Image: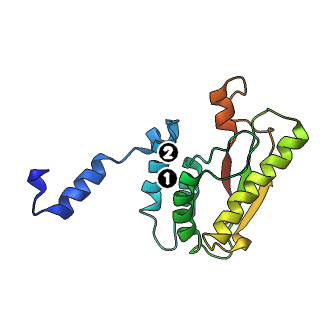
Amino acid sequence: RAACAGRSTRCRRTAAAANTLSDKTCDETRVVEDRERCAEQILDTLGNPPDLDRLVKALNWLIINFESGKWDIPEPRKRILTKAASHMKNLPDSVMIEVGGHTDDRGSDADNQTLSERRANAVKDFLVNVGTVRPTILTTKGYGESQPKATNDTEEGRFDNRRIEYTVVKR
């Protein structure tokens, strides 16, 4: 650090590069904080208008994991959602992004369907009401437990399945 005295801009860039995670690492990590850092790396480098694919990639790296049976967005995830919303505001009107809600297999099919819809709507409502994203560029869909990304036989797998996924529906 002493070597950085008087050259703070260059040293900050070097430190930031040293802390950058690769896309491969971001795709593979299960650590919530690392995935948040990965999402933030993309969000910090998006242009105006933002690259839609990179924006959706950042959103999908962000783990909005819900407690079982709940649809409240965890407080720590709201900061990154707000940052993503600031970019989403600059997307063309022609864009449509699906906010897909998913559940684990605990509970009935009907309850999980409703819960997944509530999760998707909670994220859309946050982006629209807090992030001031135009509601016309977001659509929601609840998938219930129909599309697990992991086994529901373990707590870790159920954690992975209680999630939000974003998909570009229209460019």
Reply above or below: 128 against 164. below
Is residue 146 visible to us here?
A: yes
The disc at residue 58 is none
Q: Amino acid at mark 1?
A: Ala
Residue occupying the point 79% across, 32% down: 105
Secondary structure beneath dot 2 equals: helix
Is residue 51 visible to us here?
A: no
Q: Where does residue 34 sit, x and y in percent of width and height?
A: 45, 43
Q: Where does residue 44 sit, x and y in percent of width and height?
A: 42, 62
Q: Nearer the viewer, residue 135 or 97?
A: 135
Q: Nearer the viewer, residue 70 or 105?
A: 70
Q: Nearer the viewer, residue 61 or 106?
A: 106
Q: Residues within 10 Å of mark 2 (few under 14, many from 20)?
A: many
Placement of the C terminus among the 4 image quadrants: bottom right
Residue occupying the point 66% across, 27% down: 155
Give residue 95's quadrant in the image.
bottom right
Q: Where does residue 160 sit, x and y in percent of width and height?
A: 64, 36
Horizontally, residue 14 falls left or right of residue 153, namely left
Q: Where does residue 167 sit, x and y in percent of width and height?
A: 68, 55
Q: Find out whether the residues at labels 1 and 2 contact each other: C-beta distance under 8 Å.
A: yes
Q: Amino acid at mark 2?
A: Arg
Horizontally, residue 10 falls left or right of residue 116, namely left
Q: How is the image coloured?
A: rainbow
Residue occupying the point 57% across, 63% down: 52
The disc at residue 35 is 2
Horizontally, residue 47 falls left or right of residue 98, namely left
Q: Which residue is mark 1?
A: 39
